[in-house]
Amino acid sequence: MRIRLRFFATLRERAGAAELERTLADSTTVEELWEALRNEHPKLAAYGGHIAFAVNEAYVDSKTTLQDNDEVAFIPPVSGGSARLPMFEIVEEPIEIARLVAAVGRADAGAIATFLGTTRDHNSGRRVTRLEYEAYPPMALREMQRIGDEAISRLGAKAIAIVHRIGVVEIGETSVAIAASAAHRDAAFDACRFAIDRLKEIVPIWKKEHYEGGEIWIGAQQGGLGESDPARP
């Protein structure tokens, strides 16, 4: 497949070109392309700053798989900020906390705090067998972004990442993960606590608890909806 590459500012100078084209193998990721370019251009390999990636004029994660005729932009820190992107995701697969930590890491951050919400085996005197989550993804992602922006503006966080899982989450597995970086640990801890509290208040993600003998949407009882019928054999 054929890919168009674009470089800006310091990366353009290091690559020696504003635009390049490359032929890549199918299923190549943005990360793999960047590593190949770093091997090809010694000045890019020596670049120690943060970098963001965009495909077809939209920011993407480094794990994004490229398609034929994609345009990939390599973006150094913009004036006034870092190119390290926040990460807000709704996923169906198990959450990798290391990705969140990497997303919020910054040279000016002396602390990174994390929070993991996991499925426990009991609630309100019932034995829980699993949880199931449903979301309204477009709105959920926008609200997660708002939470991150507020944590940065109000609490002094440098960057924040929030990933929530949907579908069935078994006992002991992670349903939500948050990572926050800050200059000092207090702000990082505060940002994590703020983020999980606000997420539970405003983000449109719903939790169904499956327990021995039945199931219930958590929070539904507050609206007078009650519990579902007991599970049938």
Image (cartoon, grey):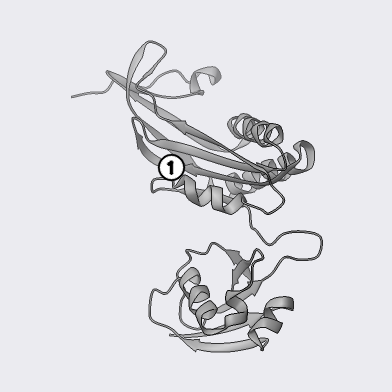
Q: Label 1: which residue?
A: 166
Q: In this view, does 10 lie to the left or right of 173?
A: right
For the residue carrying disc 1, how many other residues have a C-alpha within 10 Å: few (<14), some (14-19), or many (20+)?
A: many
Given residues 136 and 4, the one toward you in this image is 4
In the rendered view, would you say 101 is above or below 59? above
Q: Which residue is drawn at 76% across and 66% down?
A: 78
Percent across and percent down for residue 75 are 67, 71
Q: Which residue is drawn at 45% across and 18% down?
A: 226
In the rendered view, would you say 96 is above or below 175? below
Q: How many labels does the image show?
A: 1
Percent across and percent down for residue 14 are 67, 82
Q: Residue at x 48, y 21 (%)?
A: 225
In which quadrant is the C terminus drawn? top left
Residue 70 visible to the viewer: no
Given residues 210 and 120, the one toward you in this image is 120
Tell me where residue 110 sits by quadrant. top right
Q: In this view, does 81 lie to the left or right of 19?
A: right
Residue, far left: 233
Q: Which residue is drawn at 64% across and 72% down?
A: 47
Percent across and percent down for residue 175 are 44, 37
Percent across and percent down for residue 231 are 26, 23
Given residues 142 and 186, the one toward you in this image is 186
Three-letter code for the amino acid on which mark 1 is drawn: Ile
Residue, far top: 125
Secondary structure of residue under mark 1: loop
Residue 49 visible to the viewer: yes
In which quadrant is the N terminus drawn? bottom left
Tell me where residue 111 sits by quadrant. top right
Given residues 223 and 166, the one toward you in this image is 166
